[in-house]
Amino acid sequence: MKKTLNFVILAGLLGLTLWIFINNNDFDNFAELVGSAKTIFLLIAILCMILYWFFEAYILYRMKKTLNIMSSYASSLKLCMIGQYYSAITPFSTGGQPVQIYSMINDGVPMGKASSLLANRFLIHQFVVTFYALFMLIIRFNMLYNDLKLALPFVVVGYIINITILLLIIGFLFNERFIRKILYKTLDLLYRFKFVKNIDRARNKVDTTLMDYRTSVEEIKRDKKTAIELVLISIIQLTISFSITFFVSLALNFERGHFLDIIAIQSLHYMAVSFIPTPGTAGAAEGGFYVLFRVVFPKKIYP
């Protein structure tokens, strides 16, 4: 039943995206538009994507060293690509980390260390992306408020989800027992409404996750220099990733989009769709892109 529902939701979102794409576009000059694209900017956009992967691999490599896991950079790059692939094909992008843990265990890494490494990575990523998007919202608030009022509710929901997760992580740093109690109450509620079938198994997963976070937090406390370095690298990594849209717009001769405007909208787009329950946020990502970026990209395109 659950798989059928996920399939129906995915099919519906993809159908809606296709309808929006076809209904709101004139394909008469599509081939000419693609043909007139500036190759240099497309290559820069591709390079940005590759750099994003290489930065992710470096972050994983540095974390392995912090946890005394013997590994090469090439192995970390492979681990990065495994995570990218499985996150793109699973709802909520949740498949990447379990498969990465499985891969590391196969390479001889103890399960506790593998889980702790990815808990560390998630903690840093969640911290950076949340405050990155908040910063962009502040410095570009007037533009976003005036031009994107219809999309703001979805963005706000995304902020609430991301900030809630971050607060749970921070709350755990100060009061593990309190956070465990909140999560247990949430599981009890979900169990009552039949969303959770095995309450004991769910509680065991919560306990395991909290233990992994505790281990990861202790590692961060012991190596503050590396933590700061990885936060800074994550900021650069996100900026590179969010810049891809800017360089594609330059390739297509769009001149209306200011760099900071596009970065700000891209960060809001990420916050709005990152927890949509479709494989790789399929459908929602494209629909959100159409709604948010129409303020900087022209409706009619003439090459």
Image (spheres, rainbow, N blue to C red):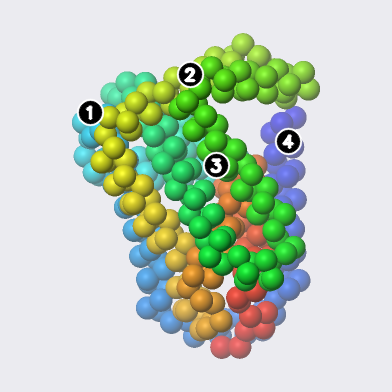
Q: Is residue 30 above or below residue 285?
A: below
Q: Secondary structure at mark 3?
A: helix
Residue wearing tag 1: 68
Answer with mark 3 or mark 4, whichever residue precedes in sequence. Answer: 4
Q: Residue furthest right?
A: 193
Q: Residues within 10 Å of mark 4 (few under 14, many from 20)?
A: few
Q: Residue furthest bottom?
A: 303
Residue wearing tag 2: 208
Amino acid type at mark 1: Asn
Please give the label number shown on residue 4: 4
Q: Position of residue 238 (x, y in %)?
A: 43, 56
Amino acid type at mark 2: Thr
Q: Position of residue 268 (x, y in %)?
A: 58, 58
Contact between marks 1 and 3 (CB within 8 A): the answer is: no
- Residue pictured at 74% horizontal, 43% vertical: 8
Q: Is residue 107 left or right of residue 150?
A: left
Q: Position of residue 135 (x, y in %)?
A: 51, 57
Q: CA distance from mark 1 to mark 3?
A: 28 Å
Q: CA distance from mark 1 to mark 4?
A: 43 Å
Residue wearing tag 3: 93
Q: Is residue 239 left or right of residue 7?
A: left
Of the pair 270 and 218, the residue shown nearer to us: 218
- Residue pictured at 49% horizontal, 70% vertical: 260
Amino acid type at mark 4: Thr
- Residue pictured at 37% horizontal, 23% vertical: 215
Q: Residues within 10 Å of mark 3 (few under 14, many from 20)?
A: many
Q: Is residue 124 above or below residue 219?
A: below
Q: Residue furthest top?
A: 200
Image quadrant in which the C terminus is located: bottom right
Q: Is residue 177 above or below residue 135?
A: above
Mark toward the viewer: 2 or 3: 2
